[in-house]
Amino acid sequence: MPDRLRAALLIAPALAVFLAFFLVPLGQLAVAGGAGGYTTILTEPRYWRSLASTLLVAAGTTAITLAIATAVGLFLARTRFPGRGTLLALLTLPLAFPGVVVGYLVIMLAGRQGLVANISLALGGDRIVFAYSLSGLLLGYVYFSIPRTLLTVMAAAEKLDPRLEEAARSLGASSFGVLRDVLLPGLAPALTAAGAICFATATGAFGTAFALASRIDVLPMVIYTEFTLQANLAVAAALSFLLGLATWAVLALARGASGGAAA
Amino acid sequence: MSVAIRLAGCGRTWPGGSIALHPLDLDIAAGETLVLLGPSGCGKTTLLRLIAGLEAPDAGGRVFFDGEDVTRLPIERRHVGMVFQSYALFPNMDVAGNIGYGLRVRGVARAAARRRVDEMLAMMRLDGLGGRRIEALSGGQRQRVALARAIAPRPRVLLLDEPLSALDARLREQLRQEIDALLRSLGITAVYVTHDQAEAMALGDRIAAMEKGRIAQIGTGRDLYHRPANDFVAGFVGDTNRLATPEGERLVRPEHLALRRSATGGFTVVQATFLGPVVRVLLRDAAGRELRADVPDEDVPAPGERVAVLFQGRSLETEAAASPA
Ligand SMILES: Nc1ncnc2c1ncn2[C@@H]1O[C@H](COP(=O)(O)OP(=O)(O)OP(=O)(O)O)[C@@H](O)[C@H]1O
Ligand SMILES: [Mg+2]
């Protein structure tokens, strides 16, 4: 009994914080939507479209980020060369940037006066601008997500037993075979965890979307518009709840698929 | 299918400039088991990895398999089997998946691969464990799976790096006998790394005793034990005493000394330890020099008694011992 009492005492603070800052507001949010809010978002195709594009951008961001971070992370974790530290520092620099700054970086690159536009113009082609579209947002999110994912992959790659790879090679495995049978399975838990964070961040990141604004219709932007510009509190709350629910469902699916490996 | 291995001028210097292996020549006959024996850090693993193709020798070194120059051939094309101390089994595959891996990546037909895996499971006494996960195996079972995995694709050479050192003594002894029988029945060329001299004696056709990046001596266990090339080999392969004789200093094995009680004897018994087959007696003379003698457990002099030491048997003819110390 004292044991159970002590356990209860130990868990009490965490439980209190969880209740005060998570469950209660979440419950309020769920209720704030009201019957009206939920009816509106369920019947209005515009909201469904924006949910779909939000999840699509998040999925794309996750896939591209994981691919790049895995390749770069594996390389950096196993190769020592002069300038490696500097390169790593540069690659992880965006870790310190707010989303809005990342948005402006994308505009500098692919906006109307951006680098890509000027080069394509100088080459005699059309002015190529994609900063203000979903591709621009995707670029920003990828840029934003790579540092954290890269660090996670590198930490995991350094912990892989190099003997496993040597064993596979001694048995005749090609580089691709080693990647498929040893490296990726070994990195799977880290990749799932990093991918989950990447996905969750991309569904909710507001700053980048806000900076690129105009033609983008992702849910965080819609919620912002409904809430501040139209003072449509019920719809904003219902949408928030829906976004949270959808993200949670995707993460739960990913966790289930990886056998509970993700954190 | 076994091949002869030849190393010519193979050395290995690390990027920092430290030398793991001085350039050496080594011939291993087809079907022979060569044991690399030596203390930690003497370069055994480095030499093994040179043969495997996991390390490249310094410029000028060449590795031949049956006369074919394989120096530039990466490990995946050398067709060698490797067994690591840490087992290095693939945790994401079951036992059968591990054993069949080399067959799968080499494109062996599924049915043939399955037959070979079953054959290996039976040979290594792992029947019924094909579907087990690796975490659910004991240390001895894991080592058997690692062996089976290395042997399944019928490699040209089998390379084992301290395969038994993670196991307890009894299991080590048992697996050592199994490996010995296995290597003989397969007739495969094998290189076996160990720092345990008993293991080396029991397994190898020949033993290469290594010291600080060089092969100090290569020969049968008997050669190394009775005719060590230098003090290092004499000391590493078995115990030795330094005995001052009229002809100079001699190295003598403890079992070649006999004791006789004598009030005028030159030595006093310091300690007598019962070891089972023999009693190890520690002796000291007036000048404080110590000797160790292994004697049968019959009427052993007790600590404090004075004894004369009789030298029965041969002294070790090392070059170092022949010159005055
Ligand atoms: N990658 C490396 N870079 C630099 N030095 C190394 C490297 N690998 C090994 N060494 C050094 O080379 C020497 C020989 O190492 P090696 O692993 O061959 O020894 P070993 O005889 O197998 O020892 P042990 O019995 O401890 O396994 C050691 O001094 C070791 O510190
Ligand atoms: Mg070693």
Image (spheres, coloured by chain):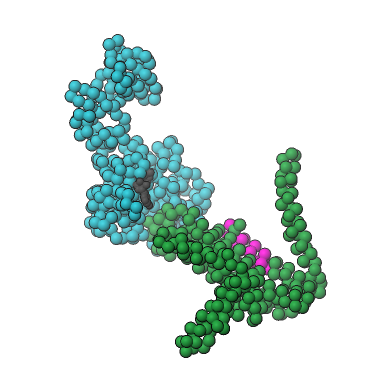
Chain colours: A green, B cyan
Observer able to see residue A53: no
Q: What's the magenta region?
A: A246-261
Q: Is residue B34 above or below residue A19?
A: above
Observer able to see residue B197: yes
The residue that appears at 53% across and 48% down in the rendered structure is: B136
Q: Give the residue furthest to the left.
A: B247
Please state which of residues A92 and A196 is positioned toward the viewer in this rendering: A92
Asked if residue A248 lies in the magenta stretch, the reply is: yes
Tell me: B105 left or right of A19.
Answer: left
Number of marks in picture = 0
Q: Give the residue furthest to the right.
A: A35
Q: Is residue B119 above or below residue B140?
A: below
The residue that appears at 61% across and 63% down in the rendered structure is: A197
Please state which of residues B314 and B174 is positioned toward the viewer in this rendering: B314
The residue that appears at 39% across and 49% down in the rendered structure is: B83
x%, y% of residue B317?
Answer: 21, 31
Please state which of residues B145 and B239 is positioned toward the viewer in this rendering: B239
Asked if residue B110 lies in the magenta stretch, the reply is: no
Q: Is residue A154 above or below residue B186?
A: below
Q: Find residue A34 and report its image quarter.
A: bottom right
- The quadrant the N terminus of chain B occupies is bottom left
Q: Which secondary structure is most common in the magenta stretch? A: helix
x%, y% of residue A134?
Answer: 60, 78
Tell me: B232 left or right of A106.
Answer: left
x%, y% of residue A236?
Answer: 75, 73
The residue that appears at 58% across and 64% down in the rendered structure is: A96
Please state which of residues B168 and B266 is positioned toward the viewer in this rendering: B266
- The quadrant the C terminus of chain B occupies is top left
x%, y% of residue A112?
Answer: 57, 83
